[in-house]
Image: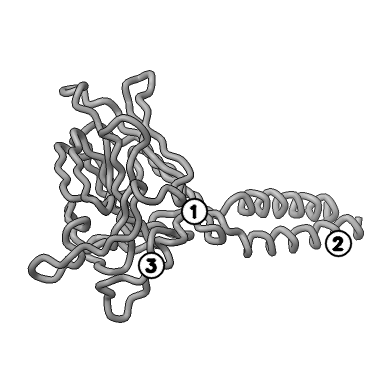
Amino acid sequence: MKSTYLFSTVALASVLAAGASATTFTFDWKAGDRGNVMNDAGKLMSIKSSFDTKTDVLKYQFTVAAEKNDPKNEINGFYLALNNGPDPSGRSGEMAVLYFDASKSGSPILTTYAYNGTSAKKSWEDGDNASGNQSPDKILSSIKDKSWVNSTIFRTNADGSRTLGFDIDATKLNLHKPKYPTAGATWDGLEFGNKVGIWFAGFEDGRFSYGNDGFLSGLSYGDRSGLDANNLQAVPEPATMSILALAAAIRRRKNRKTA
């Protein structure tokens, strides 16, 4: 029994070490969870995301129910800013914002910019939230460089809902040096850890135009469905479940030994 307990203790230590070095965090939001929600373009049903802090691979997808009053006018794009906890709104020059365009045939187009901190659609054309218009802080466009886009998702499901998303290598985003840095702040790019701050909206009837450089030159859309929230919980995987399961097993063995 002593040797079994010793083995279990060593095993737990190994799993704890693995948990401490776990690199992938997952974020799973469902309708009814905390956050400021917009449902004007159909009910936001779910958001699923993961980020690997070692490889900088970011995966993100969401599903919005069909809009009952206007089923033909469906979501075809979105914008997204993410960080490790604080509400992104108002935090200029600290993170990237991604625009996803599925309005055209073929693969969706992704462009990214430094987020100007406003709760609006203006980061692609105004790089800073100071008064007046500053030139945008352009980072990446899949029109000119597809190497950072692993895959995209754009589908209409059997129940009429729509799912949009992507799998990207966010390394260049996270290494970007902002044109308009915020004093005392660090650049976070597009990433999260055990906490998530999110500013996101899917929109219907998105109309996109692009310049010769592959970045947006115009954007308009109709109603939106999205989420604005801070300090939502993300979970390191898969080490967390292993730690809990092994710890429970050790407790059971100890209880049997003392019984």
Compared to residue 40, the image places residue 113 above or below, namely below
Report, in whole angstroms, how far the alpha carbon at label 3 lies from the one at label 1.
17 Å
Compared to residue 122, the image places residue 175 above or below, namely below
Q: Position of residue 170 (x, y in %)?
A: 44, 56
At label 2, counting other C-alpha atoms closer than 10 Å, the crowd grade (few under 14, some 14-19, many 20 or more) is few
Instruction: Check disc 3 and report the residue beneath it.
Output: 176
* Residue for point 72% across, 52% down: 246
Secondary element at image label 3: loop
Q: Foreground mark, 3 or 1?
A: 3
* Residue for point 14% across, 42% down: 220
Secondary element at image label 2: helix
Q: Residue furthest top?
A: 158
Q: Position of residue 221 (x, y in %)?
A: 16, 39
Identify the mark nearer the N-term, 2 or 1.
2
Identity, as a three-letter code, of the amino acid under mark 3: His
Q: Foreground mark, 2 or 1?
A: 1
Q: Foreground mark, 2 or 3?
A: 3
Q: Quadrant of the N terminus?
A: bottom right
Q: Position of residue 250 (x, y in %)?
A: 76, 54
Instruction: Check disc 2 and report the residue beneath it.
Output: 6
Identity, as a three-letter code, of the amino acid under mark 2: Leu
Observer-nearest residue: 249 or 49? Answer: 49
Identify the mark nearer the N-term, 3 or 1.
1
Identify the mark nearer the N-term, 2 or 3.
2
Report, in whole angstroms, how far the alpha carbon at label 2 lies from the one at label 1.
35 Å
Compared to residue 96, the image places residue 68 above or below, namely above
Q: Is residue 135 left or right of residue 108?
A: left
Q: Residue furthest front?
A: 212
Identity, as a three-letter code, of the amino acid under mark 1: Phe
